[in-house]
Image (spheres, grey):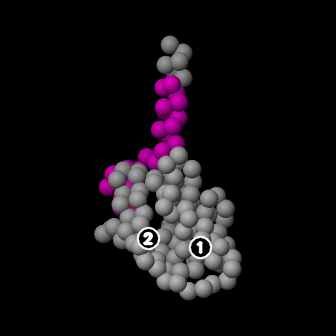
Amino acid sequence: MQKAVVVMALVGLISACQSNISGPQLAADLLGKWHINAINQQATLNYSTAYLAFSADGVLSGNNSCNQFGGHYQLQGNQLNLNAEQGTLKACVDALMQQEQQFSQVLPRITQLHMQDDKLTLLDAKRHPILQLTRIQ
């Protein structure tokens, strides 16, 4: 009996940690431009213009700290698949180039999202935060 109560409490706790926005509302709230504040829980450079933009037709665009990129995304429930397919190839200062490299390495690991108010967290399959963003528009 005690085990059942503990299991139910854990399920409730885990559910409370998940976004309470879902379905069409989540898809609508995702649309727009999001500034990338942190990569792997490390703050982005304060002069970084890194952002992601999600459009209603599934197009993903953004700036990965140095270069612009484009691609597509798919959202099903809280499951997110990002595909950056093309981008510019300009050189920037070393710090931005390093941040861009970090971004490029983590993007394929993103599988889920959590949204609360104007904050968006993109997570890996184990629900570890990969990118933390705030809404720009």
Relative to 39, is 82 on the left or the right?
left
Q: Residue at 57% of width from left, 54% of height from top? A: 129
Q: Quadrant of residue 101?
A: bottom right
Q: Is residue 3 left or right of residue 85?
A: right
- Tell me the SS state at disc 2: strand
Can residue 118 be seen in this snapshot?
no
In the rendered image of this protein, does residue 41 appear above or below residue 125?
Answer: below
Residue 69 within the segment the image draws in magenta: no
Residue that badge 2 annotates: 84
The residue at 50%/57% (across/down) is: 109
- Amino acid at the residue labelled 1: Glu
In primary-sequence order, the first of circles 1 and 2 is 2
Residue situated in front as seen by the camera: 136 or 132: 132
Query: Left or right of 123: which side holds 80?
Result: left
Q: Which residues are magenta?
A: 7-30
Residue 95 x, y percent position in the rendering: 69, 76
Instruction: Work out whether residue 5 can be spotted.
Output: yes
| Circle 1: element type | helix
The numbered dot on residue 18 is none
Q: How many marks?
A: 2
Q: Are marks 1 and 2 in contact (CB under 8 Å)?
A: no
Where is residue 27, by image quadrant?
A: bottom left
Identified by mark 2, the residue type is Ala
**Other residues around mark 2 within 10 Å, as few (<14) / some (14–19) / many (≥20):** some
Seen at 53% across and 46% down, the residue is 126
In which image quadrant can residue 46 be found?
bottom right
For disc 1, the marked residue is 100
Q: Tell me if mark 1 has few (under 14), some (14-19) or many (20+) residues whose alpha carbon lies within 10 angstroms of its own.
A: many
Residue 41 lies left or right of residue 87; in this view the side is right
Residue 50: percent from left, percent from top: 56, 74
Up-down: is 57 above or below 116?
A: below
Main SS, magenta region, reads helix
